[in-house]
Image: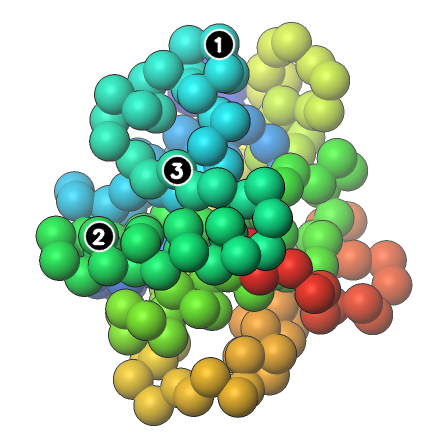
Amino acid sequence: MWILGNPIKIEGTEFSNERAIYISNHASPIDIFLMMWLTPTGTVGIAKREIIWYPLFGQLYVLAKHIRIDRSNPSAAIKSMKEAACAVVENKLSLIIFPEGTRSKNGRLLPFKKGFIHLALQSRLPIVPMVLTGTHRAWRNGSLHVRPTPITVKYLPPISTTDWTANKVDDYMTMLRDIYVKNLPEPQKPLVQEGTITGSNS
């Protein structure tokens, strides 16, 4: 990244070695590489099963034994998430998840989906938010090359999930999204802060 002209500033590294669910906003392919680089050994990602068809990256993802889930319908997604949570607990893993479920095309925060909250409820791992800024400018949507621009990665303090209850899923999701709205720079904040709750389970 330095060679390409993208100096990276990292803040809050005292929170970077937790066994946890690491979440991040997602606005560029660079986010994936940064998350894999900046989370502890024994951390795996969760992606839709179709990722295997992504040239090169999909094959590397599978070879590295990251977790794939079936999002073809709600019941399949719930079953896949339960299996993922069991694998995480049994193997003492940490997780990387992008709560938006897809990449923002303009860098602005999208609504969160519920899957990561269900994983937290089942694994009881703390959630460590990671706020990424500048990656959407470094690798713009539709571009084939990386542009020189500064990037910042900020770890926020872990959020305990030990006392979370299943009847407050929407509240937890709203709380975590509000943390991102507060910590993102103005060009990456959502234009309209509504519709933060989605009906999806993944």
The amino acid marked with disc number 3 is Arg
Residue 200 in the image: x percent, y percent?
65, 59
Determine which residue is flagged by label 1: 55
Q: Is residue 182 visible?
A: no
Left or right: 112 with respect to 155? Answer: right
| Residue contact at pointers 3 and 2, CB within 8 angstroms | no
Relative placement, left or right, of 190 versus 23 is right
Q: Secondary structure at mark 2?
A: helix
Q: Where the N terminus falls, by quadrant?
A: top left
Q: Which one is in front, 137 or 97?
A: 97
3D distance between C-alphas at marks 2 and 1: 26 Å
Label 2 with label 1: CB-CB less than 8 Å? no
Residue depth check, mark 2 versus mark 1: number of the one nearer the observer: 2
Residue 59 x/y as whole percent: 36, 15
User: For the residue labelled by badge 3, is the local secondary structure a helix, a strand or a loop?
Assistant: strand
The kind of secondary structure element at disc 1 is loop
Which amino acid type is shown beneath numbered disc 2?
A: Ala
In this view, the residue farthest toward the left is 91
Residue under the image location 59 percent in, 55 percent down? 74
Under mark 1, the amino acid is: Pro
**Quadrant of res 145:** top right
Crowd band around label 2 with a 10 angstrom C-alpha radius: few (<14), some (14–19), many (20+): some
Q: Find disc 3 in the rendering and name its residue.
A: 68
Sequence-earlier tag: 1 or 3: 1
Q: Identify whether 175 is placed above or below 69.
A: below
